[in-house]
Amino acid sequence: MRTIPNVQSIFPQQVEVEKMMVCLVDRSGSMEGSKEKSATQFVRDAFKLAKSEGFTAFKVVEFSTLLNHCSNKFYDLSKSFDWNSKSSNGKTPLYISISQLITSLKDYTGKVLINVISDGEDTEGGLKYVKMRIEEFIESGQTITFICVEKDKINFIKIGVPESNIQTYDNTGKGIENSFRVYKDAVSNYSKSVAEGEDVTRGFYKSVKN
C-alpha cells in the first residue's frame, strides 16, 4: 500500500504572528543634506513595504537633542502615510534613543523589526547601557538592523549589533536605491521566517544578494 506523505513534513507550518516595524531615524545636524533625504525616502518606502508584507503596526521614532531625545508616533497601515519628517539639527543621542526605544517595546508580544538609520556618531554617551539593551532585545527573539555607509559600520558592531544585520551603501542616488532593494528582499525573507517560527535575530541580510 502506497504511503501518502504528511504535507506538514514537506512544507513548514506557518503561524500568523503580529509584526511591528519601527524606523529609528537620526535627525541630528550630522544627518543634514543627502543623508536626511535618504533617510526620509527610506521611511516612506518602508511604510509601503510594511503594508505589503503583512505587518500589523508601523512606528517612526526621530531623535536628536533638540527633539528631547525622541519624537515618536504610530501610523495606521490601512491609511495613506501622512508623515512629515523633522529638520536635522542638534546633537546625536543615538545610544540613549536606542535604549529608550527597546525599553518602550518590552511588553509587545509580537515580533519587532527595528531599522536604525543613522551615521552612527553618538555624542551623548550610554555605550554600556545600550549594549545591555540590545543584548536583551536579541535574546528575547527580536531583530534590530542598521543601514549606513561603510565607514560607520564599526560603530554599530561595537554596540552588539550582529554584522549580518548591517547593510552598507554607497552614498549616491544609485547606491541608496540599491540599498532599499536589498532591504526589501531581506524583509520578505524575514516575514517568511517569522511565519515558519525560525530564529530571526541574526542573519537579516545574510541570504540576500547585493
Image (tube, rainbow, N blue to C red):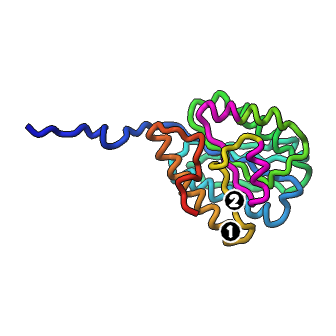
Q: Position of residue 180 (x, y in %)?
A: 62, 61
Foreground tag (2 vs 1): 2
The residue shown at (85%, 61%) is 32
What span is colored magenta in the figure? Answer: 135-158
Comparing 201 with 29, the one in front is: 201
Look at the image and say whether residue 179 sits in the magenta stretch. no
Dot 2 or dot 1, earlier in sequence: 2
Above or below, 31 against 24 in this view is below
The residue shown at (59%, 60%) is 182
Element type at marker 2? strand
- The residue singled out by tag 2 in the image is 168
Q: Which numbered dot is residue 19? A: none
- The residue singled out by tag 1 in the image is 175
The residue shown at (82%, 44%) is 94
Label 2 neighbour load within 10 Å: few <14, some 14-19, many 20+: some
Element type at marker 1? helix
Amino acid at circle 2: Thr
Look at the image and say whether residue 141 sits in the magenta stretch. yes
Q: Position of residue 65 (x, y in %)?
A: 90, 45
- Distance of label 2 from label 1 (alpha carbons): 9 Å
In the picture, which quadrant includes the N terminus? top left
Callouts 2 and 1 close, C-beta under 8 Å: no
For residue 186, side relative to residue 115 (left or right): left
Quadrant in the picture for residue 141: top right
Comparing 125 with 109, the one in front is: 125
Q: Position of residue 125 (x, y in %)?
A: 89, 39
* Count of labels in the image: 2
Above or below, 174 against 117 in this view is below
